[in-house]
Amino acid sequence: MTLKLPSTAMATAIDVGDADDIHPKNKEEVGKRLALAALEMVYKKQIVGSGPMFEKMTIKGNEAILTFSHIDGGLLTQNKYGYINGFQIAGPDSTFVWAHAKIVGDKIVVTSDKVKAPLAVRYAWSDNPGVLNLYNRAGLPAIPFRTDQWKGLTAGQEFQSGPRF
């Protein structure tokens, strides 16, 4: 949501981080990605400064078809069989299940035998989503996203910082 503000960019470290530490050890890669974002946005260089970012979803039968920006000539997966990890899909019951995702042209098609009428898709939408393998041709990882605006587990809960006595 912050990216809706003017002059903001983001670099994901989801593929170089450590599940047990919020601070990625590979700071050089994070720095390179932040530099790419600055070169594209601030200095107007003709480069791709981000990994694939979700743009829109269309539904066709039991398929959710996803369109992305920042694909740098195409999407790719590092899985030799073409499997893309980290996608979940939900229908009218709002229950997310693991999904099959495949690259078709410059889009991702997401399906599941358990969801006949898809309404929402999530990608890497958890604290530790495991090994992710969706990239653009520039070698930058896809940004985690969700297509829904359904209330999360913490919706309506007040955050309190500082010590409680």
Image: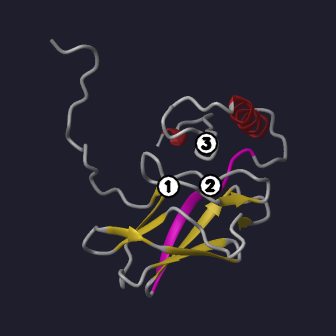
**Is residue 50 within the magenta segment?**
yes
Q: Residue at x 36, y 85 (%)?
A: 116
Label 2 sits on what residue type? Ala
Q: Are marks 2 and 1 in contact (CB under 8 Å)?
A: yes
In three-dimensional space, the C-alpha distance between marks 3 and 1, rounded to whole angstroms, equals 12 Å
Residue 158 location, x and y as percent?
21, 31
Find numbered disc 3 in the image and state the secondary structure of the residue it sits on: loop
Direction from residue 144 to residue 152 in the image, left or right: left
In this rendering, the label closer to the viewer, 2 or 1 = 1
Contact between labelled residues 2 and 3, with CB atoms less than 8 Å apart: yes
Name the one closer to the observer, 42 or 48. 48
Q: Is residue 133 left or right of residue 72?
A: left
Q: Quadrant of the C terminus?
A: top left
Q: Earlier in the sequence, mark 2 or mark 1?
A: 1
Drawn side of residue 86 relative to residue 73, left or right: left
Across and down, in percent, residue 126 comes to 42, 50
Q: Which mark is residue 12?
A: 3
- Residue 156 position within the rendered picture, expressed as x and y whole percent measured from the top left: 20, 41
Q: Amino acid at mark 3?
A: Thr
Report the residue at 46% width, 47% height from top.
128
